[in-house]
Amino acid sequence: MTRLLDRNLRDFFNPKYWLVIVCVPHTLFSALVPLSQSEVGSDTFTNATFGLLNTVVLVAIFLFTAGRSQARMVAVTAGAVFIWLLSMIAMDPSNNFDFNASLEPPFLYKFSINLELAPPLLLWALLALSGLLHWNMSEAQDAEEQSDLGSVTPENQSSQLNELRVQMGSMTPETQSNQPDELQVQLSETEA
């Protein structure tokens, strides 16, 4: 039962899914909307360009990495943004950030934050958690993830297409009329 729950939790926190879940609202609400509503040179515009830079990094991690390397890139990037957000919230007095602790029994802790800032904090924290959960992905899982990217390498695909073109070019018109379906099926399977 524990293995089943662990596996389902790991599947739920797949970094590739969480990259999309974080990237879409981040791009809309932290980059595009502020860019369209602010003047060039304002603090809002500068912050929005930083948000757009984060979007580019997230898209690059999604497209160019997989497996263990993707999980580690996600954990480092999302963790850094999460800590940056927390520190910016803590430093800005307008965010109503407050943390109090009573060092005598019953050891009460009080933590308050502006609720408008909770969604980005939660999304970036969950993205970082997804990377941390897959940080030490086994070699077999990493290889499986890498193979999901594409089982046919560009070199193999190119050589297979060239062989089919040679076969089609060397056929006479009579032979081509006898076997067009078979070669077309092979060609379409290779190109797919």
Image (spheres, rainbow, N blue to C red):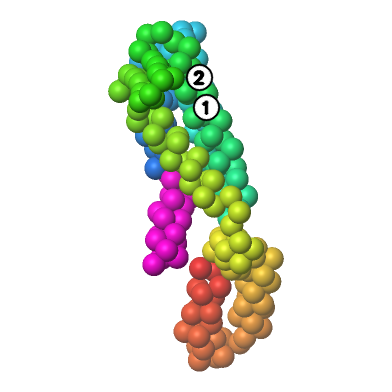
Tell me the residue that label 2 is attached to.
Answer: 87
The residue at the point 47 percent across, 84 percent down is 181
- Residue span colored magenta: 1-20
Tell me the residue that label 1 is attached to.
Answer: 83
Horizontally, residue 103 falls left or right of residue 67, namely left
Q: Which residue is at the front of the view, 31 or 68?
A: 68
Q: Farthest residue in the front direction?
A: 105
The residue at the point 56 percent across, 90 percent down is 175
Looking at the image, can residue 112 be seen? yes
The residue at the point 45 percent across, 36 percent down is 125
The amino acid sitting under disc 1 is Ile
Q: Which residue is at the front of the view, 36 or 49?
A: 49
| Number of marks | 2
Q: CA distance from mark 2 to mark 1?
A: 6 Å
Report x, y in % for residue 102. 40, 18
Answer with the quarter of the image where residue 164 lies: bottom right
In magenta segment, residue 180: no
In magenta segment, residue 4: yes
Verify CB contact (< 8 Å) between mark 2 and mark 1: yes
The residue at the point 64 percent across, 74 percent down is 160
Q: Which mark is residue 1?
A: none
How many C-alpha atoms fall within 10 Å of the one at disc 1: few (<14), some, or many (≥20)? some
Circle 2 SS class = helix
Horizontally, residue 124 falls left or right of residue 74, namely left
